[in-house]
């Protein structure tokens, strides 16, 4: 074997191994792309983010994930306007959100901005099925 050929062969072999290992490591380091963003309308986002859904349920029927913890509590069914303590108009719903209902699990959401409360009141009002 030619002595000049031998070092070139070794360098070539090492280069191939290095490139092969390097490309395998790079593909292993790649992360999957992030999931596509889901856009939730602002009023619905207020309903979810402020925890309304946990007591009143996704449809507003009073069957949320926390209702079993509130066994003797009267949780209004937003679909039935006769269950609203202070009335089912947008103004009354907004006041209830702002001030809460003393003596119940409905706390005051006075930290919310007016546009957030109005959006939430609109969303709740759209759940109403049995209107007076």
Image (cartoon, helix red, strand yellow):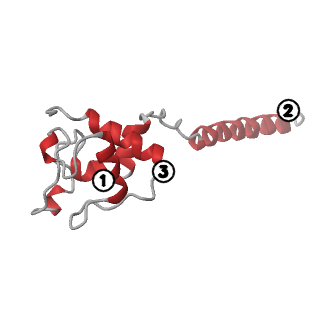
Q: Mark 3 or mark 2, which is nearer to you?
A: 3
Marked residue nearer the N-terminal end (3 or 2): 2
Q: Quadrant of the N terminus?
A: top right
Residue that appears at 34% across and 51% down: 95
The CA distance from mark 3 to mark 2 is 79 Å
Dot 1 crowding, Cα within 10 Å, few <14, some 14–19, many 20+? many
Secondary structure beneath dot 2 equals helix
Q: Which mark is residue 113?
A: 3
- Mark 1 or mark 2: name the one nearer the start of the chain: 2
If the image is split into quadrants, where does the C terminus sit? top left
Percent across and percent down for residue 68 are 14, 58
Viewer-nearest of labels 1 and 2?
A: 1
- Give the residue number, with chain letter if any, for mark 2: 5
In space, the residues marked 1 and 2 are separated at their CA atoms by 88 Å
Query: Percent from the top left, x then y, of residue 61?
Result: 17, 42
**Mark seen at residue 96:** 1
Q: Is residue 45 visible?
A: no
**CB under 8 Å between discs 3 and 2:** no
Say if residue 82 shows up in the picture: yes
Kindly give the residue lying farthest to the bottom in the view shown: 103
> What secondary structure is marked by label 1?
helix
Is 92 left or right of 2, judged from the image as shown? left
Q: Are marks 3 and 1 in contact (CB under 8 Å)?
A: no
Comparing 87 with 77, the one in front is 87
> Contact (CB < 8 A) between labels 1 and 2?
no
Residue sitting at the far left: 72
- Direction from residue 85 to residue 30 in the image, left or right: right
Closer-to-camera residue (94/77): 94
Q: Earlier in the sequence, mark 3 or mark 1?
A: 1
Name above or below for residue 62 compared with residue 74. above
Local SS, label 3: loop
The part of the image, by quadrant, that contains residue 71 is bottom left
């Amino acid at each position: 074997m030619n002595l000049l050929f031998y070092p070139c062969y070794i360098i070539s072999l090492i280069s191939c191994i290095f490139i092969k290992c390097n490309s395998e490591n790079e593909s292993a380091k790649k992360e999957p792309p992030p999931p596509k963003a889901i856009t939730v309308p602002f009023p619905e986002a207020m309903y979810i983010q402020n925890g309304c859904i946990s007591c009143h349920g996704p449809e507003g029927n009073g069957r949320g994930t926390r209702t079993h913890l509130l066994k003797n509590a009267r949780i209004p069914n937003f679909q039935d306007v006769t269950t609203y303590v202070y009335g089912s108009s947008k103004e009354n719903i907004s006041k209830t959100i702002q001030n809460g209902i003393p003596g119940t699990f409905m706390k005051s959401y006075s930290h919310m901005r007016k546009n957030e409360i109005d959006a939430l009141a609109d969303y709740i009002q759209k759940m109403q099925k049995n209107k007076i």
